[in-house]
Image: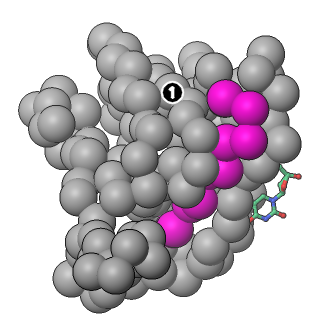
Amino acid sequence: MKHPDFSNATVLSIPKISDPDGRGNLSVIEKDTIPFVIKRVYYLYDVPSTSTRGGHAHKTLQQFLIALSGSFDVVLDNGKERISITLNRPDRGLLIPNGIWRELENFSSGAVCLSLVSAEYDENDYIREYEEYLNFKKD
Ligand code: T46
């Protein structure tokens, strides 16, 4: 999936090595899998199905989200339109460039969202008010 109005937010394949002896799968993320250097890793889990995570945009941070287990929806909003992408495979990840509003919802039971990001934690990089986001997009 590539959507021109969403600054190249893209679902990328993560290389998967299926064990020839039936021992399951191994996926690996190397420096060429995603277009930024990973500075931080965090993960969301035990999220109630009625809860929403995210609800903000980042000024500069780039991010790669993977449903390591279970599923959830990622709603992307560029200030003009919204799309919803379901993540439900550990060998796929959603690349979210900076400047895109995101909300994560509909977490399944046991869902784990792994997030690889391009920067250390900095609250100043967040835009947490939607009106402020719309003004940011106008600039
Ligand atoms: C995103 C979605 C998918 C830290 O202290 N360090 C960290 O690295 C992070 C990510 C958060 N925090 C603190 C800040 C808050 O006090 O953890 C608390 C919860 O963070 P937040 O409300 O931002 O959580 P989410 O799930 O709404 O958003 C997080 C990321 O912040 C965000 O970048 O895209 O996950």
Q: Is residue 96 visible?
A: no
Q: Find the residue positioned furthest to the front.
A: 21
Q: How many marks?
A: 1
Image location of residue 135, percent across then percent down:
47, 25
Viewer-closest of 60 and 30: 30
Q: Which image quadrant: the C terminus?
A: top left
Magenta region, residue range: 108-117
In the image, is 13 to the left or to the right of 129? left
> Residue 116: image x %, image y %?
51, 68
- The amino acid marked with disc number 1 is Asp
**Residue ID at (34%, 82%):** 21
Q: Quadrant of residue 100?
A: top left
- Residue at the far top: name it: 81
What residue appears at the point 29 percent right and 87 percent down from the top-left corner? 31
Residue 51 visible here:
yes
Q: Badge 1: how crowded within 10 Å, few (<14), some, or many (20+)?
A: some
Q: Mark 1 highlights which residue? A: 73
Image quadrant containing the N terminus: top left
Q: Is residue 139 above or below residue 8?
A: above
Q: Position of residue 121 (x, y in %)?
A: 70, 69
Q: Is residue 111 magenta?
A: yes
Q: Is residue 130 left or right of residue 76?
A: right
In the figure, residue 12 lies in which quadrant?
Answer: bottom left
Give SS at disc 1: strand
Q: Residue at x 48, y 30 (%)?
A: 74
What residue sits 33% from the left and 53% below the top? 92
Q: Is residue 1 above or below residue 125?
A: above
Residue 58, how many percent across, how many down?
Answer: 52, 49
